[in-house]
Image: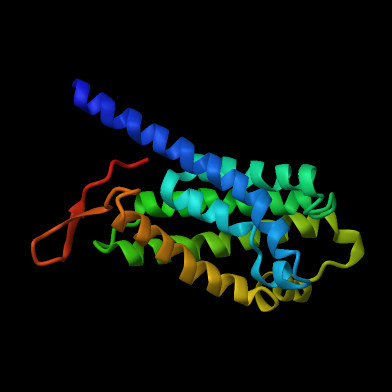
Amino acid sequence: MSAPARSALSREALRRLVYASLMVALSVVLPYVFHLIPGLGTYLSPIHLPSLFCGLVCGPLYGALCGLAGPLLSSLITGMPGALYLPPMMVECAVYGLVAGLGMRWIRTGKTLPDILVSLLSAQLAGRLAAGAVRAFLLASDGFTFRIFLTSYFVSTWPAIVLQLVLLPMLYLLLVRVRLLPRRYLVKSTGKETRPCLPKF
């Protein structure tokens, strides 16, 4: 491998490490800030945002690690989530980061925005199913039903789902525009995206 190629890989590894570290920190800060307003944290699920975004920009490994570390540190530092909700939250966020990262690795529509949206939707569904399975196992004796699962993870949290689908693609594209993230595809002089130009992570 040539020296320029090794240098590019080193920069890419450093970029992912910096973004992943920032996302873990935000996993502690965002829930604390949102919960200062009663009910806001419950409806918008701010702790989900960093792990999803980490998966999008850093890949599945960093995304999963962020999803595990973020809720754990938040619980230890701020007490949120509580001990009962910590295991399903860690699983949920880890699956978010993992599936979002895998989506960005495998999904190549030729357009950045559809890639992001499909990855996010896949991660949102997989993470909620995984968390529901963990909660059903832990709370089986307390009557955790399918109806409670749907209400907890879809009906009452639809504002969080919408927020993630709107905010995270906008943030990703903004960082690309200001060159804090590399372009996912080459761009022709016509302005249309063509073949992938990012290394797979």
Residue drawn at x 69%, y 72% as measured from the top left: 43
Residue drawn at x 84%, y 49% as measured from the top left: 83
Q: Is residue 8 above or below residue 124?
A: above
One can see residue 91 in this view: no
Identity of the residue furthest to the right in this view: 141
Residue drawn at x 48%, y 49% as measured from the top left: 55
The quarter of the image holding the N terminus is top left
Q: Position of residue 50 (x, y in %)?
A: 56, 53
Look at the image and name its color scheme.
rainbow
Report the front residue among 175 and 186.
175
Q: Position of residue 174 (x, y in %)?
A: 36, 60
Residue drawn at x 62%, y 52% as measured from the top left: 93
Count of marks, rendered view:
0
One can see residue 46 in this view: yes
Q: Is residue 106 above or below residue 153?
A: above
Task: Tell me which corner region of the image, top left, top right, bottom left or bottom right, holds residue 142.
Answer: bottom right
The quarter of the image holding the C terminus is top left
Report the front residue among 26 and 71.
26
Is 95 on the left-hand or right-hand side of 71? Answer: left
Task: Tell me which corner region of the image, top left, top right, bottom left or bottom right, holds residue 14.
Answer: top left
Q: Position of residue 71 (x, y in %)?
A: 70, 48
Q: Is residue 149 above or below residue 83?
A: below
Is 79 on the left-hand or right-hand side of 167? Answer: right
Q: Is residue 9 above or below residue 47?
A: above
Report the front residue among 188 and 28.
28
Q: Position of residue 25 (x, y in %)?
A: 61, 45
